[in-house]
Image (spheres, helix red, strand yellow):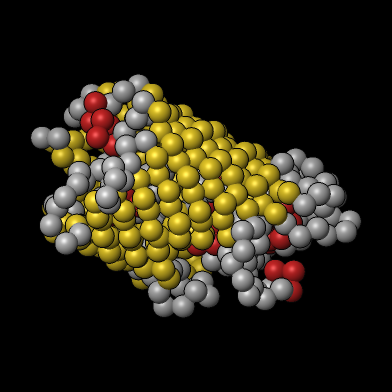
Amino acid sequence: MPEFELATRGVMSLNGQIANGRTSSATNDFSDSGVLLGLREKLYNDYRGRLVVGFQFPDAESNLGQIYFHQVFVQMENHTNTFLLGRTRLYSRLIDFPTLRDDDALDFTDVLNPFSNGINSQDSQFGNIIQYGHVFNQRYWIRAYGAHFAQSPSILGIQETNFSTNGGGGVLEYRVPNSQIWNRPVLQQLGLGANIFSTRRIPGIDNKNALTSLQASTIINLKRDPVNFVDLRHQTLYNLGFSGIPHLQSYFDLTRAKSVATYTALRFLHSKLEVPTYQLSLGFGYKTFMDLKRSTNEYQLVANGFYRIGENFDVGLQYEFKHLNGNLQALNGGRSTLQALKLAVIFSTDFLFNKQFDSRNSLLNLEHGYIN
């Protein structure tokens, strides 16, 4: 019998939003809640095989239906190599930031999918992927992958009818193993990555087919105290873009214009008896477009706090402020400032049956982590 794991994560929040100083909406949001099922089996050699199937509830304004299968993959791995085939999280970002949901600062933390119309945040986060990874000395990773990035039906007027590879990339990364994070080294992660999209050539807009984005990230533990811990997380995204885009007139232009996006988060974590008790964090993102005729940029501030009131059960409060300049105001309905206040309750747990392996590859490690 294989090892069997079941994981669930519920994210419920009451969201209040303000645009240009006026209340625009108040919603009960349960997006990103989901269930994952995992099976692992020892193979005949030193490899082990894994199957993961998971779904989540997408954003209310998306067109993905009631549920979205964000994790469906088969994986084979040993102590130095890993092969993965299926749908999972793309390398649109290299590290997690302490936000309530992983798309709360999407414009600053993720490489945006140029085949999407921007309605679904999942288009930039998940995709069909074939991946190979190799680790040296348990800390130095090299990963290469090819992927199918979801294509919206309206983009270029083409209906998606196949799932052929339309992008890929690679990652070079130093990362402390999950089993050693408790030791809190000064440098926890340092990574470089590249995403290359095979876009359709548009006369007068792009003079090449390949759209390239570069990534750099780091996690530095500033205060390594086991009770009162402080770390700093930073990522920079550089979109080489295409020439010939003087204005941002649509999401199509937004993903193809040359830009730089950065996001930095400072986090304080208090633990009691080696169990996280509460967390406070402050994040700031900035994005600018260099080649446009009109100065265009945006920035976002995210402040939040989470408190663990029971095993696997947290409550949190998050405030977001976003300011848009230049062409971005027109793309957002003429709004220059956006504010949101979210009161959240989060429940996360997993169950393991017929245990055969270590727990470092817990299903919850596939989900967005805001407190750990």
Q: Is residue 215 visible?
A: yes
Quick check: 103 above or below 236? Answer: below
Q: Quadrant of residue 189?
A: top left
Q: Residue 270, percent across and down? A: 22, 35
| Vertical order, 194 against 151 (above or below) | above
Image coordinates of residue 216 in percent, x first then y, are 55, 33
| Residue lying at 29% horizontally and 45% vertically, measured from the top left | 45
Q: Is residue 232 visible?
A: no
Q: Quadrant of residue 179?
A: top left
Locate residue 336 relative to residue 96 in the image: left or right: right
Q: Quadrant of the C terminus?
A: top left
Q: Residue at x 46, y 78 (%)?
A: 65
Q: Residue at x 37, y 53 (%)?
A: 75
Direction right: furthest residue = 204
User: Where 339 falls versus 279 (above or below)?
Assistant: below
Residue 248 lies left or right of residue 44; in this view the side is right
